[in-house]
Amino acid sequence: MDYMKKLLILITMFTLALTACQDVLEDEYKNPETVNPPEEKSVAGMFSGMLYQWQLFVKDYGEYWWQNDGWGIPAYTQVAHRYITDRYYAYYVDYADVETGVNGFQANAVTNAFGYHYTKVKEWALMKEKIEAMSQEEKDQVEVYYLLGTLFKDILALRNVDFFNSIPYSEALQGNVGILYPKYDDPKEIYLSVLDDFANIADGLSVAYNNMNADNKAFFATQDVALKGDIQKWIQFVNALRLQYGIKLAGVDQAAGTPHLVAAIGNLPTTDLYFGPYSYEHPQGGGTIIRGMYERTYANFIPNVIMKRMNHGTNTYEPGIDDPRLPVIAMPTKFNSNHDYIGVSMNSDAQTPFYVAGNRYYAYGDNLESTLAQNSVSMYNFATYFLNYDKYPAIMMTRAYVDLLLAEIALKSYATTGKTAAEHMRDAVVHSSDWWYMLNGMSSYRTDVAVLHPVKSQADIDAYADKIAADFTAAANLEDKMEIIMQQKYIHVNITDEYDLWAELRRTRHPLLEPMILRGEFMKPCPERLRYPSTELQLNGENFKTVQDEDNYTSPIFWVPESKRGTVWYMNDVLPLNLPPY
């Protein structure tokens, strides 16, 4: 296929994508098909189009479906998995293969993310050209849109770095003066450039907003389907991103990373940032992540790396002892009047007798009674997740996630946060509990079933938060404390963003995962990155040759510290496997 044919296909796909979201945007962007609308309205429409592009904040059906089959990122990060037994031997015998991507680690669907940076926000280049041609008075009315459009572009760029390491950046998205064959940039330099962008955006948003007249401020509020024109929330969101990515940079270049952390700490989100509902479609149809969750029910069992860190002691949920988020995140099993919570172990050898003895499951999400009567291991809570279709939001940033970033910053003395790391850990548990009970409370699915809609106990939440803070304080050293931070990140984020958890796992080597044990073999695959799309060699061959040596699944991303490279993120080969610190 020649270049022009590929270009025509890309244009056709983009046209179809715009048509698909037109109904949503028509309510927010008045008359988007007007011929020659005023320039500030045109720029505003580009902003709205970028904001609502799927894979930016709105997660789509396809990526989750393709990745959660047992051989993708959710499985290899152990945030969701099949019920693994020896009957899958032929499938998992090559589980440790991170070289070929054929019979082991597979992330082909996510390879599409490479193009998202260039296709999902391509309006940014046109927006930039329009603004550069405007008078200063005209620019004042649209600068907010340009700053936020730059933010969206940069978010996708950093996600791509986290997947692929070097990517085309400085010569990409140049509009009419674009370079057909952009060079691959050094990933650290991309991080430095984007973090500087974040700083400029955080500093510039208030000024840009205040320069708008009253009518354009009101219009911005209608265009901003996410935060409804609240410029302070946008600034806080940018600062949270500065923490999220500044920490990664600080781990390999503290002098470059910490100034961003110091500058951002003073103005961080005070509420959970999300928007929606963005879809009222039933999970059996539509194109959002909830459909992917619904159709992959059989691979949405909760691995022990999460379950064992929520449910302590017996399998029965014990309020005041176990994690109070457990019943809103997890589904009970068929045992003990539906109050046992049991995770999936990566030890196939140990689970096989359990399965053969008749402890099996109902694999689908279409019959709750069958699920509760037959499941011997726990799935994610139907009401909170994929049958919460009338309210499930697009998630931008949560308070608990920020708390966990602050805990790491305080632990490593990157900056003064105003609290100890243990205090941030306590905050994280409280805010995470608030978040998950809120999501569960949004759901109208089967409110008659008590185990799907547990009653929130603030006393239990506070007591458990105190326990986690005490465990953190008692942890012997920095690595043990990082284990607890990342345990909590796994519990809080879980299947809502497996890609971020994979990045954190690679960066910190925490939390420790269970090795896949299959017929006595301990397998510990450590996929470090994604491979580039095969089209890069065809379409940008000369530049691609500069990074071709790293086109594998095993070369670390630049932000993996030297001390972590070559180490695995698994427990030792000692049976029984005891998940730390419990």
Image (cartoon, helix red, strand yellow):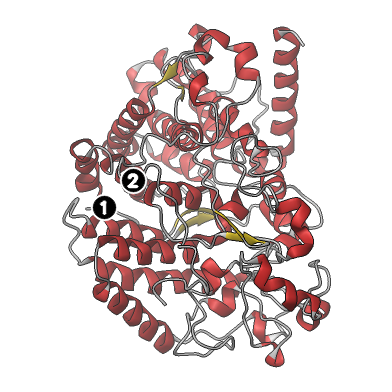
Does residue 202 appear to the left or right of 277 in the view shown?
left
- At x 68% / y 47%, what residue is drawn? 94
- At x 58% / y 76%, what residue is drawn? 328
Does residue 171 appear to the left or right of 8 in the view shown?
left
Residue farthest to the front, as pictured: 520
Query: Upstream in the sequence, badge 2 or badge 1?
Result: 2
Q: CA distance from mark 2 to mark 1?
A: 8 Å
- At x 64% / y 52%, what residue is drawn? 278
The image quadrant where one finds the N terminus is top right
Residue 211, by quadrant, is: top left
Mark sitting on residue 581: none
Mark sitting on residue 267: 1
Q: Position of residue 14 (x, y in %)?
A: 69, 26
Instruction: Give amino acid for label 1.
Output: Asn
Mark sitting on residue 235: 2
Q: Are marks 2 and 1 in contact (CB under 8 Å)?
A: yes
